[in-house]
């Protein structure tokens, strides 16, 4: 037999490797076609909305589209002294079109957000334009500057110039209580108005503690589930899963019934003499309520991954640890615990990520000191209608979750996650 | 050197899990120091329960277990200093081989150098030097098994328990591991209590075998005695192959008895029969019955060959003889035995000494 490798041919003379590749390609295409519906679904329901959210959060085209001639003229302006005649002329031309289309109100609103005081001077200008008081034959700069003294203030023109770029990161700065100053530098808002930073920190804090509490409570439960005989563990499993089958609203509402000042828990405390009847502690509409309700609701997400990992750990490992001379604690800490880390990782990641974006429960039982960043997002979606700000905060939340995931990957390794 | 004959002592031990059924009944068992003793029995016979009581994972319901004359029922497993090899090896999957072996030493607060030395020695004992940094999952079944043995021995325990350690290995590996474990035992002289349901494993490895059935030790003796001289029909049945005749004693004298079968009479060695009229089961090992015996034997009967199975080194022949159609003969593969054909009638004989009249089934 010769040792050299000969090219193997199929019966019809094509090299075997070529024909094999062909056959495999067909299979690959078939396999891909099977995944296509899911892929499309994911793109349409997940990737596109996130992309749209991102565009919305940085979109600032409104003024750019309203004042095209102004911004063209402003390109030559150094932005330090009063703008030249061309800028005023361009602004006047743009403004006339806005007046015709009745869009000057939007401009006023948007510019007023950039700098207070625009509302009234644009209204004034609007009246002048409507009455045809501006003579196009003479210097438009002089005439506009006469309309109101603020039109003579260079800061207002600088503000207009700042709205020129079609995209802005201002919403993101606002999400961390910062804003662009008059020179384009980043400034902090006054100390008593830094609401978002408090919310971010509180969200992280509550997510962290809810994860911790879920872990502390879920670990023994999962261990019990994994070691009890089948007939008991099934019953216990149903108890753990019961919250899954109950509506979130019902669960939260029942916590409200339990935790309110005249509620069952307080009644019980009074009954056993732990607190005085006229001094019932506030357990709802604050952090306590949020902790209790969220921990209870998220507990199954901790128990299930832990359980599935613990189920695979052979009881003989603990026995081996003990027979080799380890005390029960050493056997647990050196053998059992390290083997449950994949489950701990999965459970904690799951609970933390869910908790960081939790909405209904904190909204209902959280009160003023228990609301989270997601409530703020909902507020901007529904009440102020500042969707771009809501989008920006949503994306910041998403980024935060990705950072958590990345850190987790560095520390534990995503391969070590076991969801069941 | 006198060895402690009661190094491990089970003293009237009972065990019940549910308070209704006794899994182990009135167990008395002495194990000598340095002995290799095997607990053999079908599943559910209580042998693993005994091992678990000795290891400390179960407590006796009644009675006491002594280790070197000290009662140990109230000592938790980690203070007993008994090494154990588990059925599925129970290697710690998140630790390397080295860490697995170092675990019992670390919990005993032994210095790093001594740990290194002991681990080295233990690994070379099971010829696995150089595997220190492998994870258990990277080892074959046989290697994992050897690591488990090394780990159970590395902290120099006085007793090592092995709970069907070779159950998961294939036949060839199992046989070579049997010798390996036996040699390790001979070299270091540790007391080994071995649990298995595989009789050939028990016969090749042990000094003594305790045959368990129904929560009781049926017979405790050396492998050859167990095979040659079973004391009851369960042991005869369980160890090795066995031809049986059920019948009634019609004569009992001078160390032999006459047994009336449904078709004919045979002479047998009375073991557990006391008097005339007793029911009995007569047990004869297949290799004790010879075809066309040259010497005169006191049992001589003819039977019809019903089945011939070729086994390479020997041929198994199933005969219908004296009304028993399950009578097995082992015929060595030599040219002398050429008349073995299906349907032939042949003469076979055996000594009454080898036909043991035991308790009726």
Image: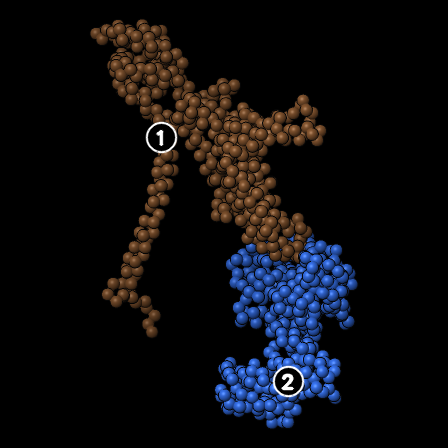
Chain colours: A brown, B blue
Query: In the rendered view, would you say A93 is above or below B228?
Result: above
Q: Is residue A273 visible?
A: yes
Q: Nearer the viewer, residue B128 or B227?
A: B227
Q: Which residue is mark 2?
A: B261
- Secondary structure at badge 2 equals strand
Q: Residue A14 in the image: x percent, y percent? A: 25, 63
Residue at the (47%, 26%) spot, across then down: A376
Is the residue under label 2 in contact with that under label 1 (CB below 8 Å)? no
- The quarter of the picture where residue A5 lies is bottom left
> What's the residue at 37%, 34% (across, down)?
A49
Q: Is residue A290 above or below residue B305?
A: above
- Identified at 74% across, 63% down, the residue is B13
Q: Residues within 10 Å of mark 1 (few under 14, many from 20)?
A: some
Residue B132, given in percent of the width and then of the height, sits at 56, 58
**Image: A52 above or below B274:** above
Q: Residue under circle 1? A: A55
Quadrant in the rendering for residue B155? bottom right
Position of the C terminus of chain B by quadrant: bottom right
A330 or A164, nearer to the observer: A330
Tell me the chain of label 1: A
- Across and down, in percent, residue A134 comes to 25, 7
């Amino acid at each position: 037999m010769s040792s050299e490798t000969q090219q193997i041919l199929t019966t019809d003379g094509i090299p075997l490797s070529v024909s094999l590749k062909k056959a495999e390609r067909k299979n690959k295409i078939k396999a891909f076609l099977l995944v296509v519906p899911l892929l499309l679904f994911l793109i349409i329901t997940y990737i596109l909305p996130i992309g749209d959210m991102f565009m919305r959060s940085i979109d600032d085209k409104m003024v750019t589209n309203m004042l095209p001639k102004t911004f063209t003229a402003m390109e030559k302006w150094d932005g330090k002294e009063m703008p030249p005649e061309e800028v005023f002329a361009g602004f006047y031309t743009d403004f006339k079109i806005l007046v015709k289309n009745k869009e000057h109100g939007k401009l006023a609103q948007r510019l007023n957000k950039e700098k207070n005081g625009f509302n009234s001077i644009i209204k004034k200008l609007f009246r002048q334009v409507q009455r045809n008081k501006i003579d196009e034959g003479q210097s438009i700069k002089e005439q506009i500057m006469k309309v109101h003294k603020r039109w003579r203030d260079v800061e207002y023109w600088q503000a207009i110039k700042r709205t020129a770029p079609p995209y802005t990161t201002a919403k993101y700065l606002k999400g961390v209580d910062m804003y662009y100053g008059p020179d384009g530098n980043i400034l902090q808002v006054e100390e008593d108005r830094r609401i978002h930073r408090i919310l971010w920190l509180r969200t992280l804090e509550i997510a962290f503690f809810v994860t911790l509490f879920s872990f502390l409570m879920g670990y023994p439960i999962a261990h019990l589930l994994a070691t009890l005989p089948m007939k008991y563990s099934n019953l216990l499993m149903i108890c753990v899963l019961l919250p899954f089958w109950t509506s979130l609203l019902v669960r939260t509402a029942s916590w409200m019934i339990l935790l309110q000042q005249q509620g069952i828990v307080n009644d019980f405390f009074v009954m056993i003499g732990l607190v005085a009847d006229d001094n019932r502690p506030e357990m709802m509409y604050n952090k306590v309520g949020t902790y209790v309700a969220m921990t209870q609701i998220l507990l199954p997400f901790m128990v299930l991954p832990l359980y599935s990992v613990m189920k695979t750990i052979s009881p003989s490992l603990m026995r081996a640890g003990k027979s080799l001379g380890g005390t029960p604690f050493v056997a647990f800490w050196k053998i059992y615990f390290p083997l449950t880390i994949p489950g701990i990782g999965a459970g904690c990641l799951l609970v933390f990520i869910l908790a960081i974006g939790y909405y209904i429960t904190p909204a209902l039982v959280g009160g003023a000191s228990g609301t989270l960043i997601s409530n703020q997002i909902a507020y901007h979606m529904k009440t102020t209608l500042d969707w771009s700000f809501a989008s920006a905060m949503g994306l910041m939340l998403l980024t935060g979750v990705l950072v958590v995931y990345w850190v987790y990957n560095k520390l534990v390794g995503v391969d070590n996650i076991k969801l069941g | 050197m006198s060895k402690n004959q009661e190094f491990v002592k089970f003293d009237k031990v009972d065990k019940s899990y549910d308070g209704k059924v006794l899994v182990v009944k009135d167990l008395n068992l002495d194990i000598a120091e340095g002995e290799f003793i095997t607990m053999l029995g079908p599943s559910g016979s209580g042998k693993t329960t005994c091992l678990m009581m000795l290891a400390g994972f179960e407590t006796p319901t009644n009675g006491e277990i002594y280790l070197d004359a000290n009662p140990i029922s109230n000592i938790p497993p980690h203070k007993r200093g008994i090494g154990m090899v588990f059925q599925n090896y129970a290697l710690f999957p998140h630790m390397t081989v080295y860490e697995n072996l170092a675990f019992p030493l670390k919990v005993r607060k032994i210095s790093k150098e001594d740990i290194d030395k002991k681990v080295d020695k233990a690994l070379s004992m099971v010829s696995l030097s150089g595997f220190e940094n492998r994870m258990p999952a990277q080892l074959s079944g046989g290697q994992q098994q050897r690591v488990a043995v090394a780990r159970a021995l590395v902290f120099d325990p006085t007793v090592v328990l092995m709970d069907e350690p070779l159950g998961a290995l294939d036949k060839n590996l199992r046989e070579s591991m049997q010798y390996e474990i036996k040699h390790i035992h001979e070299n270091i002289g540790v007391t080994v209590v071995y649990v298995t349901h595989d009789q050939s494993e028990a016969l090749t490895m042990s000094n003594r075998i305790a045959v368990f059935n129904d929560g009781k030790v049926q017979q405790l003796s050396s492998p050859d005695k167990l095979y040659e001289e079973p004391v009851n029909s369960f042991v005869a049945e369980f160890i090795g192959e066995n031809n049986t005749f059920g019948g009634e004693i019609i004569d009992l004298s001078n160390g032999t008895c006459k047994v009336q079968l449904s078709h004919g009479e045979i002479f047998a060695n009375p073991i557990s029969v006391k008097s005339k009229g007793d029911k009995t089961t007569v047990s004869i090992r297949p290799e004790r019955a010879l075809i066309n015996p040259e010497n005169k034997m006191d049992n001589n009967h003819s039977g019809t060959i019903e089945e011939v199975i070729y086994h390479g080194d020997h041929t198994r022949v199933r005969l219908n003889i004296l009304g028993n159609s399950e009578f097995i003969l082992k015929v060595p593969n030599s040219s002398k035995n050429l008349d073995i054909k299906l349907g032939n009638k042949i003469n076979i004989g055996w000594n009454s000494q080898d036909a043991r009249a035991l308790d009726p089934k």
